[in-house]
Image (cartoon, grey):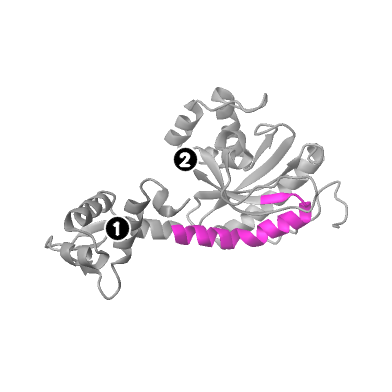
């Protein structure tokens, strides 16, 4: 399907072109100038500018005679930069976790009601989790999601507990049980999900904090229940928490420490 075949694509592409029309050399532009540059009529250009202005992506100059880029773009740019810094801080830890445990390791962030895979490193086992960057899980049923929900400000956390979450397996937590689980996560500093997202899948996650101490992501390791028994899950928990602390330190939080990643209980040599 071509871009022009998708409903609304033309308007989006025109709006993006408008934003790109503001440059270092020409940070302020008038309506007529923008319309000429994009080869659009003034009415269409004005409507697009109104929509962009409503969301803070463009703003009128003080005299109202021209437009300039709006403050919301700085917010978006900051988020993009933050995501890049987060991935850079976590990448060595994802690689180390994957090599040490041979399970798939992920870095995930909260997007609405879902945990989004921002980065991942697949494990060495033939049978194991195979997430993809950009994949999303229901936050209440994944270990990463529970870490992220548990560290929301109290009003948002309470609202999340009240949310009508879907029951995905017989072990999926909702309602008061989810609320108690999130309280434990905050107290113990990590979260597990044992067959809550799907049968036979077990994972453990720990929070990644930025320089201010805010939880901005979760590091996770997960695999089949047959490999993630109690002893091995305990070992993986220790490794994930240490990795999350080091990633947090790279973002400016606390001290990194020098905890070594050792193969989890029951690990053989890498192939």
Residue at 48% of width from left, 26% of height from top?
162
* Mark closer to the chain start, 2 or 1: 1
User: Closest to the observer: 82 or 56?
Assistant: 56
Q: Measured from the top left, where is residue 264 in percent x and y?
A: 80, 49
In what quadrant of the picture does the C terminus appear? bottom right
Magenta stretch: give its range. 80-105
- 34 on left or right of 212: left
Q: Residue at left 80%, top 37%?
A: 229
Tell me if I can see residue 252 in this picture.
no
Residue receiving disc 1? 71
Residue 81 visible in the snapshot: yes
Residue 146 covered by magenta stretch: no
Q: Nearer the viewer, residue 208 or 53?
A: 53
Residue 151, image x, y percentages: 52, 41
- Residue under the image location 30 percent in, 71 percent down: 23
Pointer 1 local density, CA inside 10 Å: few below 14, some 14–19, many at least 20: few
**Dominant secondary structure (helix, strand or loop) of the stretch shown in magenta:** helix
Q: Would residue 73 be found to the left or right of residue 222 on screen?
A: left
Tell me the distance, in whole angstroms, between the alpha carbons under discs 2 and 1: 23 Å
Locate residue 218, reporting x and y percent.
59, 48
In the image, farthest residue toward the right: 268
Q: Are marks 2 and 1 in contact (CB under 8 Å)?
A: no
* Residue 33 appears left or right of 263: left
Q: Nearer the viewer, residue 66 or 155?
A: 66
**Residue 136, numbered label:** none
> Is 181 left or right of 15, judged from the image as shown?
right
| Disc assigned to residue 112 | 2
| Furthest residue in direction bottom, as rendered | 25
Element assignment for label 1: helix
């Amino acid at each position: 399907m071509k871009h022009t075949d998708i409903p609304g694509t033309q308007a989006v592409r025109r709006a993006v072109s408008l934003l790109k029309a503001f440059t270092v050399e020409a940070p302020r532009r008038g309506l007529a100038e923008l319309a000429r540059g994009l080869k659009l009529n003034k009415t269409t250009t004005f409507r697009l500018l109104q929509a962009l202005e409503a969301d803070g992506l463009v703003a009128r100059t003080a005299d109202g005679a021209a437009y300039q880029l709006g403050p919301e773009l700085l917010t978006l740019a900051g988020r993009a930069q933050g995501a890049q810094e987060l991935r850079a801080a976590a990448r060595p830890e994802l690689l180390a976790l994957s090599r040490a445990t041979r399970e798939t390791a992920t870095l995930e962030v909260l997007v609405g009601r879902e945990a989004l895979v921002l980065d991942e490193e697949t494990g060495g086992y033939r049978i194991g989790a195979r997430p993809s960057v950009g994949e999303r899980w229901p936050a209440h049923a994944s270990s990463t999601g529970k870490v992220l929900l548990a560290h929301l400000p109290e009003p948002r956390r309470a609202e999340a507990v009240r949310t009508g979450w879907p029951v995905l397996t017989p072990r999926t937590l909702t309602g008061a049980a989810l609320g108690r689980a999130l309280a434990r996560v905050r107290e113990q500093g990590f979260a597990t999900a044992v067959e809550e997202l799907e049968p036979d899948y077990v994972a453990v996650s720990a929070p990644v904090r930025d320089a201010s101490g805010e939880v901005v992501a979760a590091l996770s390791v997960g695999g089949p229940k047959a490999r993630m028994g109690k002893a091995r899950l305990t070992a993986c928990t220790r490794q994930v928490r240490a990795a999350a602390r080091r990633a947090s330190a790279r973002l400016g939080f606390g001290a990194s420490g020098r905890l070594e990643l050792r193969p989890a209980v029951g690990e053989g040599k890498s192939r």
